[in-house]
Image (cartoon, grey):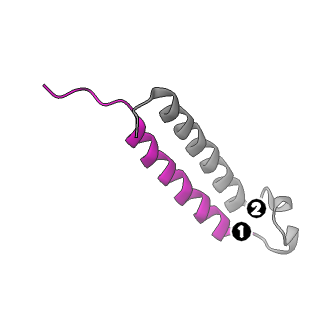
């Protein structure tokens, strides 16, 4: 992968957005986005999946960021 600050920043922003969504799903604040609507109190599986995706996004951001050259 080509090292790139822009791509790294995009993946970090994606991770932040996914963490926010994970917290909102965990708290039950955005149940209207789910198929079952307000029938369930919390969608913890969605929150866990979003948290895992956020972690993976941070891993990719680390992979694409420019590294200092070793002398």
Q: Position of residue 5 (x, y in %)?
A: 46, 27
Task: Find residue 28 and name its label.
Answer: 2
Which contiguous range is marked in magenta? 42-71
Question: Reading the chain from its start, which is encountered first: label 1 or label 2?
Answer: 2
Left or right of 67, for residue 21: right
Left or right of 44, for residue 40: right
- Give residue 3's quadrant in the image: top left
- Residue 56 vertical placement versus 43 (above, below): above
Give the residue at x 55% y 56%: 53
Q: Nearer the viewer, residue 55 or 69?
A: 69
Give the residue at x 87% y 68%: 37
Q: Main secondary structure of the magenta part?
A: helix
- Residue 2 vertical placement versus 68 (above, below): below
Residue on which disc 1 sits: 43
Task: Find residue 67 and name its label.
Answer: none
Q: Position of residue 58 (x, y in %)?
A: 47, 46
Q: Given this view, does label 1 or label 2 mark the residue nearer the observer? A: 1
Q: Crowdedness of circle 2 by 10 Å Cα count: few (<14), some, many (20+)?
A: some
């Amino acid at each position: 992968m080509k090292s790139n600050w822009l791509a790294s920043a995009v993946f970090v922003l994606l991770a932040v957005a996914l963490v926010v969504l994970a917290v909102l799903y965990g708290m039950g604040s955005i149940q209207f986005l789910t198929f079952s609507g307000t029938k369930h109190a919390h969608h913890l599986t969605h929150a866990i999946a979003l948290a895992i995706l956020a972690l993976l996004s941070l891993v990719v951001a680390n992979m694409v960021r420019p590294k200092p050259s070793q002398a």
